[in-house]
Image (spheres, rainbow, N blue to C red):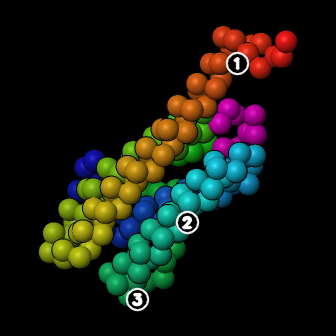
Amino acid sequence: MDLSHYTLEDLLLTALKSEIDSNTIYNKLANTVKNGLLKDKFLFLAKEEEKHKTFVESLYKKQFPKKPIRIPKKTPVPLPKISYKDENIPLCNILQQAMTAEQAAHEFYKSLAQRYTDDQQINRMLSYFSDMELGHYKILEIEKGSMERFEDADIYWPMIHAGP
């Protein structure tokens, strides 16, 4: 992901908005699913996004100590969004959107880390965030695969759970 034509401030505000939005979505999903294990995974992802937000906030304050943090309504860097307005959207579709967003976040943090080659601590932390976002992608990918297998079982063998 080429971030060279964005200012550092725009990139940090984009990261903040993305982490806030992701946290909101994962908390909302956790409150709507009935599966306890899936709920725990969504809560875990929400907490991860909150930790990322806290770090990026502190980084923003360090870089721009005299500027208040103003989260934009729309991020300057176009990142994929998770659309979860309609309660009837299949969860698999939402998970696919989240996977796309996590993949983009992985690439975003990987590129953002390159802005901090002179500060190895920040560079390593942002690179670690990049790896974590890829881990989030894998969690979602596994859950999506499980759901699709379950849906396939219902489609191809509708009486699989019927008793004698």
Q: CA distance from mark 2 to mark 3?
A: 28 Å
What residue sits right under mark 2 in the picture? 47
Q: Give the numbered dot on residue 8.
A: none
Q: Are marks 2 and 3 in contact (CB under 8 Å)?
A: no
Amino acid on which disc 2 is placed:
Lys
CB atoms of marks 2 and 1 within 8 Å? no
How busy is the neighbourhood of tag 2: few (under 14 within 10 Å), some, or many (20 plus)? some
Q: Are marks 3 and 1 in contact (CB under 8 Å)?
A: no
Q: Is residue 123 magenta?
A: no
- Pick whichever of labels 3 and 1 is earlier in the sequence: 3
**140 over 121 or under it: above or below:** above
* Range of magenta residues: 84-91
Residue 162, horizontal then vertical, whole percent: 82, 16
Q: Which residue is mark 1?
A: 154
x, y (%) of residue 153? 65, 18
Q: Residue at x 38, y 68 (%)?
A: 12
Residue 101 visible (yes or no): no
Q: Earlier in the sequence, mark 2 or mark 1?
A: 2
Q: Position of residue 110 (x, y in %)?
A: 27, 56
In this rendering, the answer to whether 139 lies above or below 118 is above
Q: Amino acid at mark 3?
A: Lys
Please report the residue visible at 44 percent of the width from the left and 45 percent of the height from the top: 137
* Residue assigned mark 3: 66
Residues 116 and 14: in front is 116
Q: CA distance from mark 3 to mark 1?
A: 58 Å
> What secondary structure is the magenta-colored segment mainly?
loop
